[in-house]
Amino acid sequence: MEYRILESADEINEYTEGLKKNKQTTIAVDFEGEFNLHAYGERLCLVQIYDGNDAWIIDPLKADMQAVKKLFEDERILKIMWDAQSDISLIVNGYSMTMKSVLDLRPAADLLELPKKDYASVTSELLGIEKKAGKSMFQKYNWMRRPIDKAAVEYALNDVLHLHSLRDEVFTKLHAQNLMNEFFRLNMIVQNRNYVRIPGQRHKKMKGYRYLSSSEKKKLKIMFEIRDGFAQRLNWPPHRVIANPDLIELSKGFANPDYIRFDRKLKPAIREEIILELRSSS
């Protein structure tokens, strides 16, 4: 698969202006990122673009992000995406930018009552495209690795190559069922949602949080912040420092910090630090 790379501010700005000059103002966009799987925190790791003629990638670890911001926020360029909300949240909270003029095709899967709602199943159902091989291999791929494997780049680009055709197909079906207005209403919700996260709320998303008492929730928040501090210090995913189920059990008082299942690569001195802080918090 052939693709081109955009990296410098001049390259990205020239591409952005070229789209408008050539009246080629619809692009398909997708991201790959790191979400506390291989390292601490969330990072944008790859941007894939298809403009109907050529495939492009932007490496956010090398690219001029101010130029990327201009591209993403240019209202004159329509960005076709699939399930855009998590991608928009990533750049809003991590990079102080947003994505304007988004056409998210994901609501169409619900409106058309398709049996499966994921991108691969929808493109298979509506476009007859075979599901790409190697999905399981790249679901947990470390997108922070450099250089990115060629096979991984090609896998990622497959997520944008069919979005233009998918848009045409879902529009035909939505129009036939008189669902276009509802589709655009749902897209306005995606576009206008406030994606800014309130600090100190991530622990509330943990499985089992809703069943904790008020005092247990307070303990969990303190222990969650302790774990987060060590994870950031080690540049580890937080679950590698202390597994989520263990953190819930600690907040309930059902577990002893001395018997937590720590990662074998965690140095004994740091393990003792963590245990000490957990004890002092309870």
Image: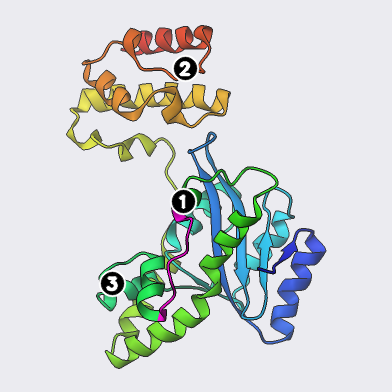
Tell me, yes or no, whether the two marked residues, 3 and 2, touch with CB atoms within 8 Å: no
What x and y, as percent, mark residue 254?
Answer: 21, 16
Mark 2 burial class by Cα count in 10 Å: few <14, some 14-19, many 20+: few
74 relative position to 184: left or right:
right
Observer-nearest of 119 and 188: 119
Looking at numbered disc 2 in the image, what kind of residue is underneath it? Arg
Query: Residue at horizontal 50%, vertical 21%?
Result: 230
51 relative position to 21: left or right:
left
Residue 186 visible (yes or no): no
Observer-nearest of 22 and 96: 22
What x and y, as percent, mark residue 196?
Answer: 46, 51
Residue lying furthest bottom:
176
Query: Residue at horizontal 49%, vertical 82%?
Result: 165
Looking at numbered disc 1 in the image, what kind of residue is underneath it? Val
Disc sitting over residue 261 in the figure: none
Label 2 or label 1, whichever lies nearer to me, is 2
Quadrant housing residue 8: bottom right
Observer-nearest of 111 and 98: 111
What x and y, as percent, mark residue 218?
Answer: 29, 25
Secondary structure under tag 2 reads loop
Disc sitting over residue 110 in the figure: 3
Mark 3 burial class by Cα count in 10 Å: few <14, some 14-19, many 20+: few
Secondary structure under tag 3 reads helix
Return the residue at label 2.
Answer: 264
Query: Residue at horizontal 45%, vertical 81%?
Result: 167
Distance from the alpha carbon under mark 3 to that under mark 2: 44 Å
What x and y, as percent, mark residue 16?
Answer: 71, 73
Residues drawn in magenta: 127-136
Count of marks placed on residues: 3
Return the residue at label 1.
Answer: 196
